[in-house]
Amino acid sequence: MIDLVGGLDQSSLDRLRAALGLSRVGRLGDDWDELFGEAIRTVAETSARLELWRDVDTGQWRLDVEGISEPPDPAVQSLLTVIRGEIVAAEVQVASVRRRR
């Protein structure tokens, strides 16, 4: 899971979706919308499902990275490095990267 810093406006949301190849779902103006994009990504033969979420209570954003298979840790780190680089390239800041327990 990748926690993002602050809120997203429409411009930053569009940049992030484009950088990560996410689908366009959810509307910023609808405060009950939580899912704002999803995609399947493969980097170095490691696949993962990406989902961009906004918490309706706190307004915080996160990108869930859920592995489709159980790759070895170096492959997961490679995938996370690429995804984090794409987030930064979209001019969105990463607050933390953590594993779901």
Image (tube, rainbow, N blue to C red):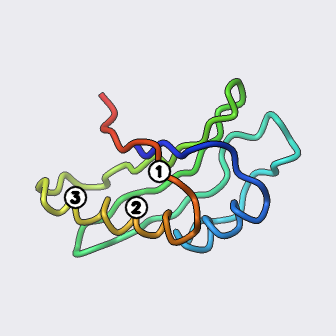
Which residue is depicted at the point 42% across and 56% down? 49
> Does dot 3 land on a helix, a strand or a loop?
helix
- The image shows residue 89 at horizontal and vertical percentages of 51, 72
Residue where numbered disc 2 is placed: 84
Mark 1 nearby-residue class (10 Å; few <14, some 14–19, many ≥20): some
Residue where numbered disc 1 is placed: 94
Whichever of callouts 3 and 1 sits on the residue coming sooner in the sequence is 3
Which residue is depicted at the point 65% across and 40% down? 54
Pick whichever, 49 or 5, lies toward us: 5
**Disc 1 residue type (three-letter):** Val
Quarter assignment of residue 75 = bottom left
Residue 95's place in the image compared with 37, above or below, is above
Quarter assignment of residue 76 = bottom left
Whichever of callouts 3 and 2 sits on the residue coming sooner in the sequence is 3
Query: Residues under labels 3 and 1: Cα distance?
Result: 15 Å
Residue where numbered disc 3 is placed: 77
Q: Tell me the tag on residue 75.
A: none
- The image shows residue 43 at horizontal and vertical percentages of 30, 73
For the residues labelled 3 and 1, say whether their Cβ atoms are less than 8 Å apart: no
For the residues labelled 1 and 2, say whether their Cβ atoms are less than 8 Å apart: yes
- The image shows residue 39 at horizontal and vertical percentages of 51, 64
Whichever of callouts 1 and 2 sits on the residue coming sooner in the sequence is 2
For the residues labelled 3 and 2, say whether their Cβ atoms are less than 8 Å apart: no
Residue 97's place in the image compared with 75, above or below, is above
**Disc 2 residue type (three-letter):** Arg
Pick whichever, 53 or 48, lies toward us: 53
